[in-house]
Image: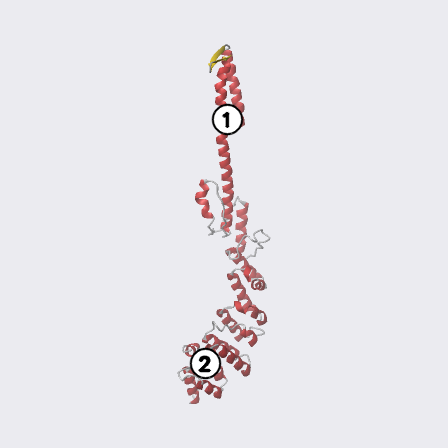
């Protein structure tokens, strides 16, 4: 029963019992209270305890009603927090939520650190519009569609490494390859995974003028892919000046320098190639094999002899063996005996 209804009903009841008492006992009754005589109608004496009981009951109902109301408000607030926690969990971007009641504190805090993975995105109707909208957007991203997070009011709320942000970025790269330039130009704003995807696109489609601007981002595996594309004549504007930007003398090994030598031999003049591999050998002893390989490729006997004389007899054994075979007129190709394994395992 509502408090207002209870009060009205109580007042009616008080008047009823007072009236009934007056009808059946219209006389007065005197009561001594602290040596003071109080003379009132019996009906009034009947009404006084009823009124006191009525007032106490109202206070009781008001107290517990207020307590119940406040708890209900807390539950409503916690329900909103729970929905919000589920929403961000679906986006795999858990955020801190404060819960007021013990019922929700016991499990709600877990959602502050939880990402929700939907094995099958629900097809049934979802009553909460916010969660429903999140699921619909995720469905679109999973299907390969690009979503403008700023337009959807999500920009700034999802981190750059968020799974759905990365997937959404990859979707955009597939639809708009030119987006790769933005990713690489503002790489601090994008996840490493998206940057790597942008680099893959750059390697496949950009010419060397554009690609060389981001040489510091390209790892050795991608560098080899670039050389493969150069070998296949699929890279424009390839030059030795560009190539210098990709060579990391601290991380490159013998086989890497040898790979470079084998590519440029097919592309540039002997003089240019010799100057380049000599430069590499000067900057790193690990590139000496590449230089010696180039000398053999161009059959520069005097330079080869001088090179051997400048090094210990035990160095570059496979090249010395090849030199003896050629001197004795054995018909054997350079690449049949000089490989990464044979040439670089002793360097």
Q: Is residue 239 visible?
A: no
Residue 323 in the image, given as x and y percentages of width and height: 43, 86
Q: Secondary structure at mark 2?
A: helix
Disc 2 vs disc 1: Cβ atoms closer than 8 Å? Answer: no
Position of residue 276 relative to residue 173, above or below, is: below
Q: From this viewpoint, is residue 213 visible?
A: yes
Residue lying furthest front in this view?
35
Picture layout, residue 61 above or below residue 287: above
- N-terminal of the pair, mark 2 or mark 1, is 1
Read off the residue under disc 1.
58
Quadrant showing the C terminus = bottom left
- Residue lying farthest left? 314
Q: Nearer the viewer, mark 2 or mark 1?
A: 1
Badge 1 density bin: few <14, some 14–19, many ≥20, Cα 10 Å: some
Residue 201, picture quadrant:
bottom right
Residue at mark 2: 335
The image position of residue 276, as x and y in percent, is 53, 79
Closer to us: 282 or 7: 282
Asked whether, in this view, residue 180 is left or right of residue 34, the answer is right
């Amino acid at each position: 029963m509502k408090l207002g209804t209870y009060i009205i009903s109580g007042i009616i009841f008080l008047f009823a019992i007072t009236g009934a008492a007056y009808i059946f006992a219209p006389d007065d009754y005197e009561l001594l209270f602290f040596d003071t005589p109080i003379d009132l109608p019996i009906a009034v004496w009947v009404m006084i305890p009823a009124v006191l009981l009525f007032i106490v009951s109202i206070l009781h109902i008001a107290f517990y009603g207020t307590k119940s109301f406040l708890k209900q408000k807390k539950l409503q607030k916690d329900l909103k927090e729970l929905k919000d926690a589920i929403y961000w969990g679906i986006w795999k971007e858990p955020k801190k939520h404060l819960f007021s009641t013990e019922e929700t504190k016991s499990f709600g805090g877990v959602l502050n650190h939880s990402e929700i993975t939907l094995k099958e995105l629900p097809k049934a109707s979802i009553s909460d519009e916010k969660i429903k909208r999140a699921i619909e957007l995720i469905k679109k991203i999973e299907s390969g569609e690009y979503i403008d997070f700023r337009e959807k009011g999500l920009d700034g709320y999802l981190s750059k490494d968020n799974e759905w942000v990365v997937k959404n970025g990859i979707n955009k790269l597939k639809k708009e390859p030119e987006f790769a330039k933005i990713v690489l130009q503002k790489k601090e704003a994008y996840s490493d995974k998206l940057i790597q995807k942008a680099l893959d696109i750059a390697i496949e489609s950009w010419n060397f003028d554009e690609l060389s601007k981001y040489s510091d981002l390209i790892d050795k595996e991608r560098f080899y892919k670039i050389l493969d594309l150069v070998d296949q004549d699929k890279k424009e504007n390839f030059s030795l000046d560009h190539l210098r930007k990709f060579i990391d003398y601290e991380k490159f090994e013998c086989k890497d320098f040898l790979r470079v030598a084998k590519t440029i031999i097919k592309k540039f003049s002997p003089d240019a190639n010799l100057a380049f591999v000599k430069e590499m050998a000067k900057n790193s002893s690990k590139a000496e094999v590449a230089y010696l390989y180039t000398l053999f490729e161009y059959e520069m006997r005097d330079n080869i002899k001088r090179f051997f004389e400048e090094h210990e007899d035990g160095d570059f054994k496979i090249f010395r063996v090849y030199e003896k075979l050629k001197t004795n007129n054995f018909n054997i190709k350079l690449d049949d005996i000089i490989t990464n394994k044979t040439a670089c395992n002793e360097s």
